[in-house]
Amino acid sequence: MKMTKKCFRLKSLLFYILILSTFLLASCTSSTETKENINSTEINNEVDENTNPDLQAAEFIRAVDGDTIKVNIDGEEFTVRMIGIDTPESVHPDKEKNNEFGEMASKFTKSMFSENQTIYLEKDVSDTDKYGRLLRYVWLSPSDNLNDGTEIEEKMYNAVCVKEGFAKSVRYGKDTKHADTFDKLEKNAYENQKGLWGITDSTFSQEIKEEPSESSYIGNSNSKKFHKITCGGLPSEKNRVYFSSREEAIENGFSPCKTCNP
Ligand SMILES: [Zn+2]
């Protein structure tokens, strides 16, 4: 009788040890798994993987000038005109249009990219211009919120170029998604005499002082007429298309208003 009791106790003790060790092993494994998960999350953050479907990855090849770059998309070379901005000319076929300030803007752009760097392209309304160049915003690293002002000024090159005073904020046609942000950055760069703004004799800063960031002409997307900003017959906000020159309005198929005669 006594032996059986002892034996029973021993058996139940062994049973408990077995259960306990199973639990211990299980918790041990799960804590290792958690650690592995944390590590893989950290690695993903470092890689900065693009998960935004509105951004297309491309490989930077070289800068043509301050606002134009060459990129490689899936093995094919494209020219990208960075939209919403304008830098002084440095490689214009009409050599009289090129100047040392264009060279400076070009150097700044070159300094901000490195060969084979992955960049991320954001489209606005237009795909290409009449020269077949892709019209894009160029992100230096991917972002989940393309409309956040802080993200834009830190990660999008078009904005950085305006922020550092090497480009003007310019509204071309309908591609004006980020124009208000660019205008603010331009105002700030001007007030703080950043980049080309700080050079008093720069044709760039003279141009800007004479002609602030607002576009000079406003088109009506319904009637296809364009007006001076001062015209009494301007279209409603939602039908407005902005142009910085008469030529640009005409090239886009708009005809001058007969009242204000732009
Ligand atoms: Zn008019």
Image: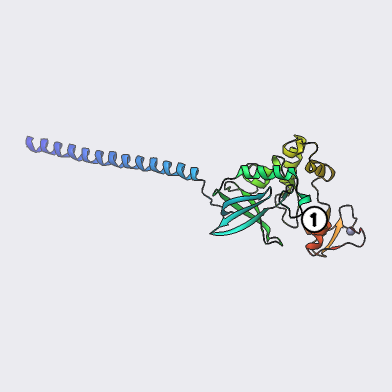
Front-most of residues 132 and 2: 132
Residue drawn at point x = 79 percent, y = 55 percent: 242
Residue 217 pos. (x, y %):
83, 55
In the drawing, does residue 169 fall left or right of residue 80? Answer: right
Residue 244 pos. (x, y %):
80, 53
Residue 194 pos. (x, y %):
73, 36
Residue 146 pos. (x, y %):
63, 49
Q: Can residue 238 be seen by looking at this rendering? A: yes
The three-letter code of the residue at mark 1 reads Phe
Residue drawn at point x = 70 percent, y = 44 percent: 103
Q: Which residue is mark 1?
A: 243
In the picture shown, does residue 102 fall above or below 192? below
In which quadrant is the C terminus drawn? bottom right
In the picture shown, does residue 10 fall above or below 179? above
User: Element type at marker 1?
Assistant: strand
In the drawing, does residue 242 fall left or right of residue 80? Answer: right
In the drawing, does residue 246 fall left or right of residue 113? Answer: right
Q: Is mark 1 within 8 Å of ligand 1?
A: no
In the drawing, does residue 93 fall left or right of residue 10? Answer: right
View extreme (front): residue: 95
Task: Report which quarter residue 236 is drawn in.
Answer: bottom right
Front-most of residues 114 and 122: 114
Front-most of residues 257 and 69: 69
For the residue carrying disc 1, how many other residues have a C-alpha within 10 Å: few (<14), some (14-19), or many (20+)? many
Front-most of residues 5 and 74: 74
Figure colour scheme? rainbow
In which quadrant is the N terminus drawn? top left
Q: Can residue 149 be seen by looking at this rendering? A: no
Q: How many marks?
A: 1
Q: Quadrant of ligand 1?
A: bottom right
